[in-house]
Amino acid sequence: MSPVDYVIIGHVCRDRTPAGPMFGGTAAYAGRTALAHGWRVGVITSTGPDWDPRPALDGAYLMNLPAERTTEFENVYTPEGRRQRVHGVAERLLPAAVPLEWRRPRVVHLGPIAGEVDPSLLEAFEGALRGVTPQGWMRAWDAQGQVYPQPWREAEWILPRADAVVFSEEDIQGDWETARRWARQTRILVVTQAARGATLFLDGLPHPIPAYPVEEVDPTGAGDVFAAAFFIRLWETRDPLAAARYAARVAALSVTRPGLEGTPRPEEIAAIRREMAF
């Protein structure tokens, strides 16, 4: 039996904020969400010597590849959307980094934030639900670190091999034609739409997923929380619509607190499950 249920692969980064450096990255938000579900979590990441990811993922197993630098982002939210700058990138994550005993989890989640996850990792796991959040393959940066969108070059290879794909409307710059094209290449694809909920494409057909109204404090990481909750519930039920509605409920909770504090707590997951009658 695998010692881990949920393997998340991606950099735990350092986010520059007005309040000081904070933990960030899909691996941190999704890993904590899976921990709150009572799942055993394995995280494959890379950081520099100045950034220890363990405090962000208490209770998870970590495989941390040493790097000269830590992946570091600066996020600025404006009425026109998020602007980002990257100040460093840690090591690339390859299949060789995966311990043999981690290769049969329930879910494997490829969560790049800076193009660091090798797509071939999708085929390194046996019998797992293969979840992908591709945002880190959909951006690049210039010599000054200013982040800009780029085409997802690996899409044609990854989409047919993934079991479920989640990204935001912002990640595709509102290009729904691209979203619909990708949805025809994979069975389950979700486009999250912040306070407007999400659209689930099932075999290419769209299904609206309503949002849960809450008072937003900080949207950071909400998409990663959604993705982890979605992959977990999809593994439990094999029902994409039920999984998407559940993920929307969990993600709504995440925006009511700042940063990693927004990730769900075990008692909140239990309460949501009771509320949704399962």
Image (cartoon, rainbow, N blue to C red):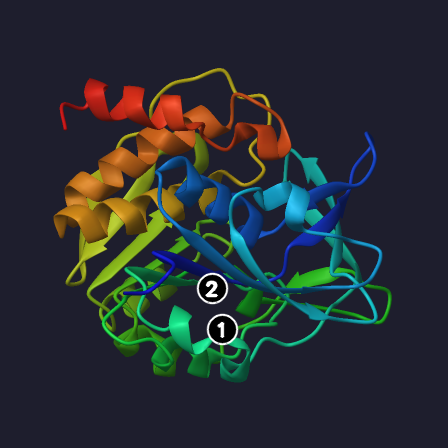
Looking at the picture, tell me which residue is in the foreground, 225 or 141: 225
Q: Which residue is mark 2?
A: 134
Query: Residue 268's spot in the image, x, y percent?
Result: 38, 22
Residue beneath the point at 29% across and 48% down: 232
Q: CA distance from mark 1 to mark 2?
A: 8 Å
268 up-or-down from 117: above or below = above
Q: For the residue marked with disc 2, what is the amino acid?
A: Pro
Query: Residue 22's spot in the image, x, y percent?
Result: 73, 40
Q: Is residue 161 visible?
A: yes
Looking at the rendered structure, the secondary structure element under dot 2 is helix
Q: Quadrant of residue 250?
A: top left
Q: Is residue 220 left or right of residue 237?
A: right
Q: Is residue 37 left or right of residue 217?
A: left
Position of the C terminus, as image quadrant, is: top left
Looking at the picture, tell me which residue is in the foreground, 252 or 139: 252
Q: Quadrant of residue 203?
A: bottom left
Among the two numbered marks 1 and 2 on one chain, the one whose residue lies closer to the N terminus: 2
The residue furthest top is 215
Residue beneath the point at 35% across and 39% down: 38
110 up-or-down from 154: above or below = above
Q: For the residue marked with disc 1, what is the amino acid?
A: Trp
Query: Residue 123's spot in the image, x, y percent?
Result: 35, 81
Residue beneath the point at 38% across and 18% down: 213
For label 2, count other residues whose C-alpha is less than 10 Å away and answer few (under 14), some (14-19) or many (20+): many
Callouts 1 and 2 close, C-beta under 8 Å: yes
Q: Is residue 139 left or right of residue 244?
A: right
Q: Nearer the viewer, mark 1 or mark 2?
A: 2
Query: Residue 251's spot in the image, x, y percent?
Result: 41, 33
